[in-house]
Image (cartoon, rainbow, N blue to C red):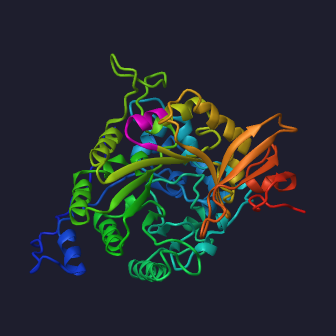
Amino acid sequence: MQPNQPNRTPANSAPPFSPDSEHPTEEQRKQDFLVKVASPRYDRGGVSGLKRYAEGKVDASSAHLYSTSEARKLIELGIEDRMKVKISDHYNALVTGDSDMPPSAPLRNLVTARGEEVKDLSGEVDPSNQLSYSPAAGILHKYEMALLYVVKTCSAHCRYCYRLDLFTGKSGKPLAQLAAVRDYIDAHNEAAAANHGFHPETGRPTLREVLLSGGDPMVLSNTKLAAWLIELAEAGISTIRIGTKELAFFPHRFDDDFFGMLDAFNEAYPNVRLVFAVHFTHPDEFLIRDDEGAYVTAENDHRFMWLAPVENAVEQLTRRRHFISLENQTPIIRDVNNDAHVLKILQQELYAHGIGNHYYFQCRQIEGHKAFAVPVEECWQLFTDSQRHLSGVEAHARFVMSTEQGKVEVCGVSGEPDDGYVVFKWHRNPGAAAQRGQIAIARRNPQALWINDYQDRVFQDPEGLIGSTE
Protein backbone atom coordinates (compact mmCIF):
# COMPACT_ATOMS: atom_id res chain seq x y z
CA MET A 1 0.00 0.00 0.00
CA GLN A 2 1.49 3.33 -1.03
CA PRO A 3 0.58 6.16 1.32
CA ASN A 4 -1.14 9.24 -0.04
CA GLN A 5 1.30 12.12 0.16
CA PRO A 6 0.15 15.72 0.54
CA ASN A 7 -0.08 17.82 -2.60
CA ARG A 8 2.04 20.71 -1.45
CA THR A 9 1.27 24.37 -1.96
CA PRO A 10 3.83 27.06 -1.15
CA ALA A 11 3.96 28.15 2.47
CA ASN A 12 3.28 31.78 3.28
CA SER A 13 6.44 33.52 2.15
CA ALA A 14 5.88 36.84 3.91
CA PRO A 15 8.68 37.86 6.28
CA PRO A 16 8.13 37.16 9.96
CA PHE A 17 6.74 40.01 11.97
CA SER A 18 9.18 41.91 14.15
CA PRO A 19 7.36 43.77 16.90
CA ASP A 20 8.53 47.25 17.74
CA SER A 21 8.29 46.59 21.46
CA GLU A 22 8.89 43.80 23.91
CA HIS A 23 5.13 43.52 24.38
CA PRO A 24 3.53 42.80 20.99
CA THR A 25 -0.20 43.22 20.57
CA GLU A 26 -2.56 40.28 20.11
CA GLU A 27 -2.72 40.92 16.38
CA GLN A 28 1.07 41.01 16.15
CA ARG A 29 1.36 37.67 17.96
CA LYS A 30 -1.15 36.12 15.59
CA GLN A 31 0.68 37.41 12.52
CA ASP A 32 4.03 36.24 13.83
CA PHE A 33 2.67 32.71 14.32
CA LEU A 34 0.59 32.36 11.15
CA VAL A 35 3.43 33.43 8.88
CA LYS A 36 5.28 30.27 9.97
CA VAL A 37 2.45 27.88 9.07
CA ALA A 38 2.80 25.77 5.94
CA SER A 39 -0.59 24.54 4.76
CA PRO A 40 -0.41 21.81 2.10
CA ARG A 41 -3.47 20.08 0.72
CA TYR A 42 -3.92 16.47 1.80
CA ASP A 43 -5.25 13.85 -0.60
CA ARG A 44 -7.00 11.16 1.42
CA GLY A 45 -8.35 9.45 -1.68
CA GLY A 46 -11.11 7.00 -0.95
CA VAL A 47 -14.79 7.07 -1.82
CA SER A 48 -17.60 9.27 -0.52
CA GLY A 49 -21.16 8.08 -1.07
CA LEU A 50 -22.70 4.85 -2.33
CA LYS A 51 -23.51 6.15 -5.81
CA ARG A 52 -20.05 5.39 -7.19
CA TYR A 53 -20.26 1.81 -5.89
CA ALA A 54 -23.74 1.40 -7.38
CA GLU A 55 -22.48 2.61 -10.76
CA GLY A 56 -19.35 0.47 -10.64
CA LYS A 57 -17.12 3.55 -10.75
CA VAL A 58 -14.62 2.55 -8.07
CA ASP A 59 -11.23 0.89 -8.33
CA ALA A 60 -10.71 -2.82 -7.69
CA SER A 61 -9.79 -2.51 -4.02
CA SER A 62 -12.75 -0.26 -3.20
CA ALA A 63 -15.09 -2.62 -5.03
CA HIS A 64 -14.44 -5.20 -2.30
CA LEU A 65 -16.58 -3.13 0.10
CA TYR A 66 -19.87 -3.24 -1.83
CA SER A 67 -20.96 -4.98 -4.99
CA THR A 68 -23.06 -2.84 -7.35
CA SER A 69 -26.20 -4.74 -6.32
CA GLU A 70 -25.44 -4.32 -2.59
CA ALA A 71 -24.86 -0.60 -3.02
CA ARG A 72 -28.11 -0.18 -4.96
CA LYS A 73 -30.08 -2.05 -2.31
CA LEU A 74 -28.58 0.05 0.49
CA ILE A 75 -29.46 3.22 -1.41
CA GLU A 76 -33.04 1.98 -1.74
CA LEU A 77 -33.15 1.29 2.00
CA GLY A 78 -32.21 4.92 2.68
CA ILE A 79 -28.96 4.07 4.47
CA GLU A 80 -27.38 7.38 3.57
CA ASP A 81 -30.29 9.32 5.02
CA ARG A 82 -28.98 7.98 8.29
CA MET A 83 -25.21 8.35 7.58
CA LYS A 84 -23.33 8.94 4.36
CA VAL A 85 -20.79 6.26 3.43
CA LYS A 86 -17.20 7.51 3.40
CA ILE A 87 -13.76 5.86 3.65
CA SER A 88 -10.15 6.95 3.09
CA ASP A 89 -7.72 4.96 0.94
CA HIS A 90 -5.59 4.11 3.97
CA TYR A 91 -8.50 2.65 5.94
CA ASN A 92 -9.95 0.95 2.86
CA ALA A 93 -6.67 -0.95 2.47
CA LEU A 94 -6.86 -2.19 6.06
CA VAL A 95 -10.47 -3.27 5.58
CA THR A 96 -10.11 -5.00 2.22
CA GLY A 97 -6.66 -6.56 2.51
CA ASP A 98 -4.98 -4.20 0.05
CA SER A 99 -2.36 -3.48 2.74
CA ASP A 100 -0.32 -6.69 2.44
CA MET A 101 -2.35 -8.03 5.37
CA PRO A 102 -5.58 -10.06 5.47
CA PRO A 103 -8.86 -8.14 5.38
CA SER A 104 -10.07 -6.93 8.78
CA ALA A 105 -13.65 -7.92 9.59
CA PRO A 106 -13.86 -5.66 12.68
CA LEU A 107 -12.77 -2.61 10.69
CA ARG A 108 -15.17 -3.52 7.90
CA ASN A 109 -18.03 -3.56 10.41
CA LEU A 110 -16.89 -0.19 11.71
CA VAL A 111 -17.19 1.70 8.41
CA THR A 112 -19.42 -0.26 6.00
CA ALA A 113 -23.15 0.28 5.90
CA ARG A 114 -25.49 -2.62 6.64
CA GLY A 115 -29.22 -2.88 6.14
CA GLU A 116 -29.82 -3.60 9.84
CA GLU A 117 -28.96 0.04 10.60
CA VAL A 118 -32.36 1.18 9.37
CA LYS A 119 -34.49 -1.73 10.59
CA ASP A 120 -35.00 0.11 13.86
CA LEU A 121 -34.29 3.83 13.81
CA SER A 122 -35.37 4.39 17.38
CA GLY A 123 -33.03 6.65 19.26
CA GLU A 124 -32.43 10.31 20.02
CA VAL A 125 -32.12 12.92 17.28
CA ASP A 126 -30.04 15.02 19.68
CA PRO A 127 -28.31 12.46 21.93
CA SER A 128 -28.29 13.46 25.60
CA ASN A 129 -30.19 16.65 24.73
CA GLN A 130 -26.96 18.49 23.99
CA LEU A 131 -28.66 21.54 22.52
CA SER A 132 -29.92 22.41 26.01
CA TYR A 133 -26.28 23.02 26.94
CA SER A 134 -25.49 25.17 23.90
CA PRO A 135 -25.25 28.85 24.95
CA ALA A 136 -24.18 29.97 21.46
CA ALA A 137 -23.97 28.51 17.95
CA GLY A 138 -21.59 25.55 17.75
CA ILE A 139 -20.67 25.68 21.44
CA LEU A 140 -21.49 22.94 23.96
CA HIS A 141 -20.76 24.11 27.53
CA LYS A 142 -22.00 21.32 29.76
CA TYR A 143 -19.12 20.75 32.16
CA GLU A 144 -16.21 22.90 33.34
CA MET A 145 -14.81 22.73 29.78
CA ALA A 146 -16.45 23.64 26.48
CA LEU A 147 -16.77 21.69 23.22
CA LEU A 148 -16.73 23.38 19.81
CA TYR A 149 -18.14 21.91 16.61
CA VAL A 150 -15.59 23.13 14.05
CA VAL A 151 -16.20 20.80 11.07
CA LYS A 152 -18.92 18.42 9.86
CA THR A 153 -16.94 15.59 8.30
CA CYS A 154 -14.13 13.08 8.90
CA SER A 155 -11.74 11.19 6.62
CA ALA A 156 -14.04 8.18 6.98
CA HIS A 157 -17.39 7.70 8.67
CA CYS A 158 -17.98 5.35 11.61
CA ARG A 159 -21.43 3.82 11.36
CA TYR A 160 -21.93 4.18 15.14
CA CYS A 161 -20.97 7.88 15.07
CA TYR A 162 -22.01 9.87 18.17
CA ARG A 163 -22.20 13.00 16.03
CA LEU A 164 -24.73 11.48 13.65
CA ASP A 165 -27.12 14.39 14.12
CA LEU A 166 -24.40 16.94 13.26
CA PHE A 167 -23.57 15.08 10.03
CA THR A 168 -27.21 14.77 8.93
CA GLY A 169 -28.29 18.19 10.17
CA LYS A 170 -31.38 16.72 11.84
CA SER A 171 -30.82 18.49 15.16
CA GLY A 172 -29.96 21.80 13.53
CA LYS A 173 -26.59 22.14 15.25
CA PRO A 174 -24.45 24.75 13.49
CA LEU A 175 -20.68 25.04 13.40
CA ALA A 176 -18.89 27.37 15.77
CA GLN A 177 -17.49 30.67 14.51
CA LEU A 178 -14.21 32.12 15.75
CA ALA A 179 -15.50 35.57 16.67
CA ALA A 180 -18.59 34.27 18.46
CA VAL A 181 -16.53 31.72 20.41
CA ARG A 182 -14.11 34.40 21.51
CA ASP A 183 -16.96 36.66 22.61
CA TYR A 184 -18.54 33.85 24.60
CA ILE A 185 -15.32 32.86 26.38
CA ASP A 186 -14.53 36.48 27.23
CA ALA A 187 -18.02 37.14 28.57
CA HIS A 188 -18.14 33.91 30.59
CA ASN A 189 -14.74 34.44 32.16
CA GLU A 190 -15.41 38.09 32.94
CA ALA A 191 -18.60 37.08 34.77
CA ALA A 192 -16.76 34.30 36.61
CA ALA A 193 -13.90 36.62 37.61
CA ALA A 194 -16.40 39.02 39.15
CA ASN A 195 -17.93 36.17 41.18
CA HIS A 196 -14.93 34.48 42.84
CA GLY A 197 -14.13 32.34 39.77
CA PHE A 198 -17.61 30.89 39.18
CA HIS A 199 -20.27 32.05 36.76
CA PRO A 200 -23.11 33.56 38.83
CA GLU A 201 -25.88 31.87 36.82
CA THR A 202 -24.51 28.43 35.88
CA GLY A 203 -21.99 27.85 38.67
CA ARG A 204 -19.39 26.77 36.13
CA PRO A 205 -15.81 27.82 36.87
CA THR A 206 -13.55 29.99 34.75
CA LEU A 207 -13.32 28.41 31.30
CA ARG A 208 -9.76 27.19 30.87
CA GLU A 209 -10.16 24.08 28.65
CA VAL A 210 -11.78 23.68 25.24
CA LEU A 211 -12.27 20.63 23.00
CA LEU A 212 -12.19 21.05 19.22
CA SER A 213 -14.57 18.47 17.82
CA GLY A 214 -16.99 17.87 14.99
CA GLY A 215 -16.47 15.92 12.73
CA ASP A 216 -12.72 15.66 12.93
CA PRO A 217 -10.70 18.90 13.33
CA MET A 218 -7.74 17.18 11.67
CA VAL A 219 -9.47 17.34 8.28
CA LEU A 220 -9.03 21.12 8.49
CA SER A 221 -5.99 22.70 6.87
CA ASN A 222 -3.05 23.64 9.05
CA THR A 223 -3.96 27.30 8.59
CA LYS A 224 -7.55 26.85 9.75
CA LEU A 225 -6.54 24.66 12.66
CA ALA A 226 -3.87 27.19 13.63
CA ALA A 227 -6.48 29.98 13.59
CA TRP A 228 -8.53 28.10 16.18
CA LEU A 229 -5.48 27.45 18.35
CA ILE A 230 -4.49 31.12 18.27
CA GLU A 231 -7.94 32.44 19.10
CA LEU A 232 -8.36 30.08 22.04
CA ALA A 233 -4.88 30.82 23.36
CA GLU A 234 -5.49 34.56 23.13
CA ALA A 235 -8.77 34.08 24.99
CA GLY A 236 -6.80 32.66 27.92
CA ILE A 237 -7.56 28.96 27.34
CA SER A 238 -4.72 26.94 28.89
CA THR A 239 -5.64 23.45 27.61
CA ILE A 240 -6.88 22.75 24.09
CA ARG A 241 -8.07 19.26 23.20
CA ILE A 242 -8.28 18.06 19.62
CA GLY A 243 -10.68 15.15 19.18
CA THR A 244 -9.52 13.02 16.25
CA LYS A 245 -9.63 9.60 14.62
CA GLU A 246 -7.18 10.69 11.94
CA LEU A 247 -4.38 8.53 13.38
CA ALA A 248 -6.49 5.55 12.33
CA PHE A 249 -8.15 6.92 9.18
CA PHE A 250 -5.26 8.87 7.63
CA PRO A 251 -2.07 8.90 9.74
CA HIS A 252 -0.12 10.56 6.91
CA ARG A 253 -1.87 13.79 7.91
CA PHE A 254 0.65 14.04 10.74
CA ASP A 255 3.52 15.26 8.59
CA ASP A 256 6.45 17.66 9.01
CA ASP A 257 4.34 20.68 8.10
CA PHE A 258 1.80 19.84 10.77
CA PHE A 259 4.44 19.30 13.44
CA GLY A 260 6.13 22.51 12.33
CA MET A 261 2.84 24.32 13.01
CA LEU A 262 2.58 22.73 16.46
CA ASP A 263 6.16 23.70 17.32
CA ALA A 264 5.56 27.26 16.19
CA PHE A 265 2.40 27.39 18.30
CA ASN A 266 4.28 26.14 21.35
CA GLU A 267 6.97 28.74 20.77
CA ALA A 268 4.35 31.49 20.58
CA TYR A 269 2.13 30.19 23.40
CA PRO A 270 4.36 28.05 25.68
CA ASN A 271 1.82 28.00 28.52
CA VAL A 272 -0.90 26.30 26.47
CA ARG A 273 -1.11 22.51 26.58
CA LEU A 274 -2.50 20.44 23.71
CA VAL A 275 -4.29 17.15 24.34
CA PHE A 276 -5.02 14.86 21.41
CA ALA A 277 -8.15 12.91 22.31
CA VAL A 278 -7.53 10.08 19.85
CA HIS A 279 -9.96 7.36 18.83
CA PHE A 280 -8.53 3.91 18.28
CA THR A 281 -11.34 1.37 18.34
CA HIS A 282 -9.49 -1.86 17.53
CA PRO A 283 -5.82 -2.97 17.41
CA ASP A 284 -6.21 -3.76 13.69
CA GLU A 285 -6.05 0.00 13.16
CA PHE A 286 -2.39 0.17 14.15
CA LEU A 287 -0.86 -3.33 14.51
CA ILE A 288 0.82 -5.42 11.79
CA ARG A 289 -0.83 -8.79 11.14
CA ASP A 290 0.62 -11.90 9.49
CA ASP A 291 -0.99 -14.00 6.75
CA GLU A 292 -3.15 -15.73 9.35
CA GLY A 293 -4.31 -12.44 10.87
CA ALA A 294 -2.20 -12.80 14.04
CA TYR A 295 -0.36 -9.79 15.38
CA VAL A 296 3.37 -9.81 14.64
CA THR A 297 6.00 -9.37 17.35
CA ALA A 298 9.48 -8.04 16.76
CA GLU A 299 12.38 -10.46 17.03
CA ASN A 300 13.45 -10.93 20.67
CA ASP A 301 10.63 -8.61 21.76
CA HIS A 302 7.27 -9.34 23.34
CA ARG A 303 5.75 -6.14 21.97
CA PHE A 304 3.64 -6.15 18.83
CA MET A 305 4.84 -4.32 15.72
CA TRP A 306 2.96 -1.19 14.67
CA LEU A 307 2.10 0.08 11.21
CA ALA A 308 4.86 2.52 10.30
CA PRO A 309 2.68 5.57 9.44
CA VAL A 310 0.80 5.31 12.73
CA GLU A 311 3.87 4.60 14.84
CA ASN A 312 5.78 7.49 13.27
CA ALA A 313 2.93 9.93 13.94
CA VAL A 314 2.51 8.78 17.55
CA GLU A 315 6.26 8.94 18.13
CA GLN A 316 6.40 12.52 16.86
CA LEU A 317 3.53 13.52 19.13
CA THR A 318 5.00 11.86 22.22
CA ARG A 319 8.39 13.49 21.57
CA ARG A 320 6.59 16.73 22.33
CA ARG A 321 5.30 15.57 25.68
CA HIS A 322 6.38 18.84 27.27
CA PHE A 323 3.28 20.40 25.71
CA ILE A 324 1.31 17.50 24.15
CA SER A 325 -0.59 14.61 25.75
CA LEU A 326 -2.51 11.76 24.10
CA GLU A 327 -5.61 10.07 25.50
CA ASN A 328 -7.68 7.37 23.80
CA GLN A 329 -11.40 6.82 24.08
CA THR A 330 -13.79 4.58 22.19
CA PRO A 331 -17.20 2.98 22.51
CA ILE A 332 -17.63 -0.78 22.75
CA ILE A 333 -19.43 -1.78 19.55
CA ARG A 334 -21.01 -5.08 18.54
CA ASP A 335 -18.99 -7.03 15.95
CA VAL A 336 -16.16 -4.49 16.17
CA ASN A 337 -14.46 -4.61 19.57
CA ASN A 338 -16.82 -6.44 21.95
CA ASP A 339 -14.07 -8.87 22.93
CA ALA A 340 -12.17 -8.71 26.23
CA HIS A 341 -8.88 -9.87 24.68
CA VAL A 342 -9.10 -7.22 21.97
CA LEU A 343 -9.77 -4.52 24.57
CA LYS A 344 -6.84 -5.76 26.66
CA ILE A 345 -4.41 -5.52 23.72
CA LEU A 346 -5.78 -2.10 22.89
CA GLN A 347 -5.07 -0.77 26.39
CA GLN A 348 -1.65 -2.40 26.70
CA GLU A 349 -0.34 -1.27 23.34
CA LEU A 350 -1.63 2.27 23.60
CA TYR A 351 -0.10 2.78 27.03
CA ALA A 352 3.21 1.32 25.84
CA HIS A 353 3.30 4.00 23.13
CA GLY A 354 2.51 6.92 25.40
CA ILE A 355 -1.26 7.07 24.87
CA GLY A 356 -3.41 7.15 27.99
CA ASN A 357 -6.53 5.01 28.30
CA HIS A 358 -9.29 7.49 29.07
CA TYR A 359 -12.87 6.29 28.48
CA TYR A 360 -14.66 3.23 27.15
CA PHE A 361 -18.21 4.22 26.31
CA GLN A 362 -21.54 2.50 26.19
CA CYS A 363 -22.89 3.02 22.65
CA ARG A 364 -24.94 6.21 22.75
CA GLN A 365 -28.65 6.21 21.90
CA ILE A 366 -28.26 7.62 18.41
CA GLU A 367 -30.84 6.76 15.76
CA GLY A 368 -30.26 3.13 14.76
CA HIS A 369 -28.12 2.39 17.84
CA LYS A 370 -29.62 -1.08 18.33
CA ALA A 371 -27.59 -2.32 15.36
CA PHE A 372 -24.38 -1.49 17.24
CA ALA A 373 -25.06 -1.49 20.97
CA VAL A 374 -23.97 -4.24 23.34
CA PRO A 375 -26.02 -4.44 26.60
CA VAL A 376 -24.64 -2.35 29.45
CA GLU A 377 -23.92 -5.25 31.80
CA GLU A 378 -22.25 -7.28 29.06
CA CYS A 379 -20.05 -4.29 28.17
CA TRP A 380 -19.13 -3.84 31.83
CA GLN A 381 -18.10 -7.50 32.03
CA LEU A 382 -16.03 -7.27 28.84
CA PHE A 383 -14.33 -4.13 30.09
CA THR A 384 -13.69 -5.65 33.53
CA ASP A 385 -12.30 -8.87 32.04
CA SER A 386 -10.02 -6.86 29.74
CA GLN A 387 -8.36 -5.23 32.75
CA ARG A 388 -7.85 -8.35 34.88
CA HIS A 389 -4.15 -8.67 34.09
CA LEU A 390 -3.32 -5.08 33.23
CA SER A 391 -1.02 -3.11 35.49
CA GLY A 392 -2.37 -0.21 37.49
CA VAL A 393 -1.05 2.38 35.05
CA GLU A 394 -2.41 0.51 32.02
CA ALA A 395 -5.86 0.20 33.55
CA HIS A 396 -6.72 3.87 34.04
CA ALA A 397 -9.76 3.81 31.76
CA ARG A 398 -13.34 4.03 33.01
CA PHE A 399 -16.47 2.53 31.47
CA VAL A 400 -19.04 5.32 31.20
CA MET A 401 -22.22 6.55 29.57
CA SER A 402 -22.55 10.13 28.30
CA THR A 403 -26.08 10.92 29.46
CA GLU A 404 -28.10 14.11 29.72
CA GLN A 405 -27.40 14.04 33.47
CA GLY A 406 -23.66 13.89 32.87
CA LYS A 407 -21.02 11.21 32.44
CA VAL A 408 -22.15 8.18 34.43
CA GLU A 409 -19.60 5.55 35.38
CA VAL A 410 -20.74 1.95 35.66
CA CYS A 411 -18.82 1.05 38.83
CA GLY A 412 -19.90 -2.51 39.42
CA VAL A 413 -22.32 -5.34 38.65
CA SER A 414 -22.97 -8.00 41.26
CA GLY A 415 -25.19 -11.02 41.80
CA GLU A 416 -27.20 -13.04 39.33
CA PRO A 417 -28.97 -11.47 36.35
CA ASP A 418 -32.40 -11.93 37.91
CA ASP A 419 -31.65 -10.54 41.37
CA GLY A 420 -28.30 -8.73 41.29
CA TYR A 421 -27.47 -5.01 41.31
CA VAL A 422 -25.72 -2.41 39.19
CA VAL A 423 -23.93 0.54 40.77
CA PHE A 424 -23.70 3.83 38.88
CA LYS A 425 -21.74 6.94 39.86
CA TRP A 426 -21.94 10.48 38.64
CA HIS A 427 -18.43 10.75 37.24
CA ARG A 428 -19.00 14.17 35.67
CA ASN A 429 -21.90 16.45 36.43
CA PRO A 430 -23.18 19.47 34.46
CA GLY A 431 -23.08 23.03 35.70
CA ALA A 432 -21.64 23.43 39.18
CA ALA A 433 -21.12 19.63 39.45
CA ALA A 434 -22.98 19.49 42.77
CA GLN A 435 -23.81 15.77 42.42
CA ARG A 436 -20.39 14.59 41.28
CA GLY A 437 -19.45 11.38 43.07
CA GLN A 438 -23.01 10.46 44.11
CA ILE A 439 -24.15 6.91 43.39
CA ALA A 440 -27.32 5.12 42.35
CA ILE A 441 -28.13 1.42 42.57
CA ALA A 442 -30.57 -0.49 40.39
CA ARG A 443 -31.58 -4.11 40.05
CA ARG A 444 -29.95 -5.78 37.08
CA ASN A 445 -31.42 -5.74 33.60
CA PRO A 446 -29.28 -7.88 31.24
CA GLN A 447 -31.11 -6.44 28.21
CA ALA A 448 -30.52 -2.78 29.15
CA LEU A 449 -28.82 -0.71 26.46
CA TRP A 450 -28.93 2.60 28.36
CA ILE A 451 -29.43 3.97 31.85
CA ASN A 452 -33.11 4.70 31.25
CA ASP A 453 -33.68 0.96 30.86
CA TYR A 454 -33.20 0.76 34.67
CA GLN A 455 -35.90 3.30 35.56
CA ASP A 456 -38.42 0.64 36.60
CA ARG A 457 -35.98 -1.10 38.98
CA VAL A 458 -34.35 1.68 41.00
CA PHE A 459 -33.14 0.52 44.41
CA GLN A 460 -31.33 3.64 45.60
CA ASP A 461 -31.13 6.96 43.77
CA PRO A 462 -31.33 9.94 46.15
CA GLU A 463 -29.98 12.42 43.59
CA GLY A 464 -32.19 11.28 40.70
CA LEU A 465 -29.36 9.94 38.55
CA ILE A 466 -31.53 7.20 37.04
CA GLY A 467 -34.96 8.54 37.91
CA SER A 468 -38.13 6.50 38.16
CA THR A 469 -41.12 5.71 35.98
CA GLU A 470 -43.42 5.93 38.99
Q: Is residue 333 left or right of residue 294?
A: right
- Number of numbered discs visible in the structure rendering: 0
Q: Residue at x 62, y 37 (%)?
A: 383
- Please state which of residues 190 and 146 is positioned toward the viewer in this rendering: 190
Q: Is residue 68 magenta?
A: no
Q: Quadrant of residue 405?
A: bottom right
**Residue 128, position as x, y percentages in the image:** 66, 64
As displayed, is residue 401 above or below residue 318? below
Residue 301 appears in the picture as rendered: yes
Residue with the most extreme front position? 196
**Residue 43, position as x, y percentages in the image:** 32, 55
As displayed, is residue 56 above or below residue 163? above
- Please state which of residues 100 and 143 is positioned toward the viewer in this rendering: 143
**Residue 403, position as x, y percentages in the image:** 66, 60
Residue 375 appears in the picture as rendered: no
Q: Quadrant of residue 268?
A: bottom left
Q: Is residue 105 left or right of residue 31?
A: right
Give the quadrant of the N terminus.
Answer: top left
Q: Is residue 108 left or right of residue 422?
A: left
Residue with the most extreme top position? 300
Q: Quadrant of residue 463?
A: bottom right
**Residue 70, position as x, y percentages in the image:** 61, 47
Q: Which residues are magenta?
A: 348-356
Give the quadrant of the C terminus.
Answer: bottom right
